[in-house]
Amino acid sequence: MRIAYFCNYVGDEFRRKYCGGKKFALSGILKSQGIARSLLKAGHEVTIYSPALTVCRQFIPQFTEEEHFEEGILVIKYPPLLSFRKCGPINAIRLRQLIKRDVKEEDYDVFIYYNITFGAALLLNIFKNSIRILEYEDNIFNKNLVGEKNKYNRIKLWRYNYVIPRTDGVMAVCMGMLNHGEVPNRILTPGIINEEVINNVSDRKNQLAKGKPVKIFLTGGTHYSKGSDLLIGAMRYVKTPCSLEIYGNGQFYNKALEELKLVPNYHQVHLNGYLPHGDLMKLLDKEADILINTTRSMGVGAQAAGFPFKMMEYASTGRPIVSSELGKFDEDFNRHVSYYEGENPQKVAEAIEDVIAHYEERVSLALNLQKRVLDEFSISGTSKKLNSFLQSIRRKRCNQ
């Protein structure tokens, strides 16, 4: 099938020309690439239509690039872009104009769109004769600002009520989002593991080094929703000496910086910036004792806000994971992970100490989870599931 895929993907040429060559390790970009490669592996043609980024501070002319993977050639098309803050709606309109011209000459069997956005709403009617699939990564009603505030709730509700009835299938990252609305066809796509993960992890049984701090790693963003303040605050209640490594782009949430001043001196805390994705995975494999996810539930419930992409990457390492309830997936996945409830640093600390106290047992569980994740959530494993999903929808349409 011929597939049009709307998402904020940026390819190698775009990064080289307009991002100073920096390879953004953003979960959305990695997830979109994994979806596209999985579809290519199943024999489908995939064209990504992307409004790209709004942080390059320049005008970017319309262009097309191709990326070559072992699964096939991925085509990425960009409209003329104003890559400046708050220019997203303008770029969405320009992308719509580009797609309207393209569909006059070539038909698409499937239209996949990333999240319930203004851009997706603009495009749905162009693809009214195609199978329309929502890739649902972030709950539209997430309250992800400090203090669980939200903006434009009425506009979001209108957008939701417009998009969902025009959607034939949903690929969601968690059960709470999978069950939204009355979409008839549904599949879970929590994360895709690529070769930057697979080639940089091992199945060795990690052990805590005697007389040395326990190495705890948090990766991803450093703002409010990621809960870095909860982890740093937890260090006040963890009695075992630890070395805390935090990797992520962006400005630290102020409360996290305040919590740094209260960390006991028998702990170490290192705030690290950007690290290329493959290098980060290699570092986790070499250095990490415990991996942690402190992402907040963002006001919509512990298993309805989303499922952090990093949870699948964490699971691929075979290291024990401590996570908020947002990192819950299915029953089998959950029994291999140590969860804490709520947003209380003391609860985070208790979960960390419990893993340290039962470390050998937790490593055995983590290695069992690693086997499942590297098989089922690889590009090959995802390809089989997505292809079956699309073929099922097409058969239903043909029989109507």
Image (cartoon, rainbow, N blue to C red):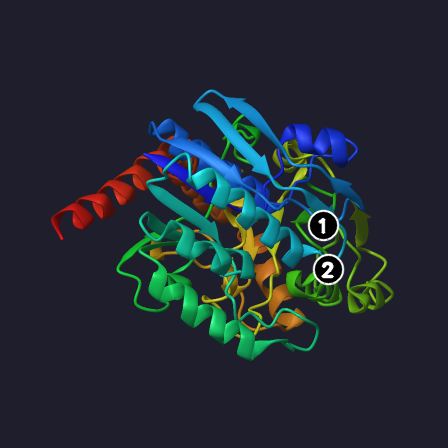
Q: Which residue is denoted by mark 1 in the rendering?
A: 54
Q: Residue at x 81, y 49 (%)?
A: 270
Q: Amino acid at mark 2?
A: Lys
Q: Position of residue 172 (x, y in %)?
A: 41, 55
On the image, the x and y values in percent for residue 188 come to 37, 52
At 51% from the left and 30% from the top, the residue drawn is: 75
Real-space Cα separation, disc 2 to disc 1, in angstroms: 7 Å
| Element marked by disc 1 | loop
Disc 2 crowd rating (10 Å Cα; few below 14, some 14-19, many 20+) is few
Instruction: Please say if 169 is above or below 390.
Output: below
Position of residue 144 relative to residue 357, above or below, is below
Residue at the left extreme of this rendering: 399
The amino acid pointed to by label 1 is Thr
Q: Alpha-carbon neighbours of circle 1 within 10 Å: few (<14), some, or many (≥20)?
A: some
Tag 2 residue: 86
Where does the image place residue 135, in percent across and percent down from the top left? 44, 52
Residue 387 visible, this angle: yes
Could you tell whether 45 is left or right of 327 in the image? left
Q: Earlier in the sequence, mark 2 or mark 1?
A: 1
Q: Residue at x 59, y 46 (%)?
A: 8
Checking the image for residue 201, the label placed there is none
> Closer to the camera, 324 or 387?
387
Query: Exactly how many numbered labels are in the figure?
Result: 2
Depth check: give the residue in front, 76 or 183: 76
Locate residue 149: give its quadrant.
bottom right
Q: Quadrant of residue 233?
A: bottom right
Name which residue lies at 64% across and 38% down. 284
Q: Nearer the viewer, residue 32 or 200?
A: 32
